[in-house]
Amino acid sequence: MLTKRIIPCLDIKNGRTVKGINFVDLRDAGDPVELAEIYAKSGADELVFLDISATEEGRRTLADLVLRVAEKVNIPFTVGGGISSVKDVDILLHNGADKVSINSSAVKNPQLINDLVAKFGSQCIVVAIDAKQIDGEWKVHLVGGKVPTELNLFTWAKEVEKRGAGEILFTSMNHDGTKDGFANEALAKLSTELNIPIIASGGAGTMQHFTDTFVEGKADAALAASVFHFKEIEIKDLKEELKRNNIPVRL
């Protein structure tokens, strides 16, 4: 069985790491490069950097941040936010990113997924999907969760896979920052219906939540932010706990 991955997520706004609840009420969580270095040394499997204001403000993800991170960490990292062209991706990968994450731009122009996969390979193209459960149906949202669409989570996820994306990063907006656990029912459905890895995001609060998302949610990786940023959970302790629960992890 493949090992399950633990991925700290660093949401970047104006060059700083921030964290909110349900995508709002942001507070400062530190310097992203310093945090990246700490996570790399403490056993994180990968890192994700999301420039959460890039799409909204119509500018590209900060390429210099990628350069600085690449100099300091020796684990794979993904960068997202404001990526809308082959050129954007070329710059980020050239500067040291291992993967890129696209979200709003993929919904607005699904052909972008095909174009990026054709140019760079599916292994480095992650499609992030932010979705909110409304009246029992999961609806995809854009621009950092601010713009609702009529697109169904599962329909869109299947199209993303068909177009060649290597991975899906699913964030439940209902669970984001609540620390009440991941959206395991939706995750299990995604994992069952798709053949590409699913990264669970939104809702981590305890070590048990990670165990649950791997067992009940069938997730391939679990992403979290504030529980790591504010040292509520140490990655080393988490991995030892997962191992005790017979979940394969890299120690």
Image (tube, rainbow, N blue to C red):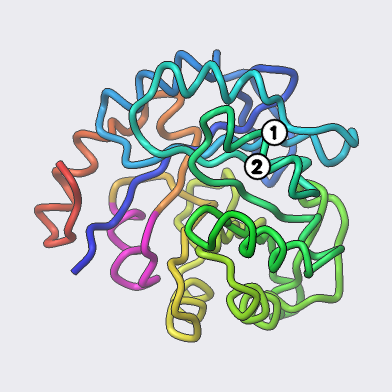
Q: Residue at x 78, y 41 (%)?
A: 82
Nearer to us in this view, 143 or 120: 120
Give x and y (percent) for residue 159: 67, 79
Q: What amino acid type should be assigned to the residue bearing mark 2?
A: Gly
Residue 206 image-quadrant placement: top left
Q: Dot 1: what SS?
A: strand
Left or right for 200, reference 13: left
Residue 24 appears at what percent x and percent y?
Answer: 74, 38
User: Magenta residues?
Assistant: 208-221
Is residue 212 part of the magenta span, yes or no? yes
* Tags 1 and 2 touching, CB below 8 Å: yes
Instruction: First in sequence, mark 1 or 2: give its number.
Output: 1
Relative height, residue 87 to residue 4 (above, below): above
Amino acid on which the number 1 mark rests in the picture? Asp
* Circle 1 residue: 51
Instruction: Please name the residue that numbered disc 2 is placed on.
Output: 80
Quarter the N terminus occupies = bottom left
**Residue 215 in magenta?**
yes
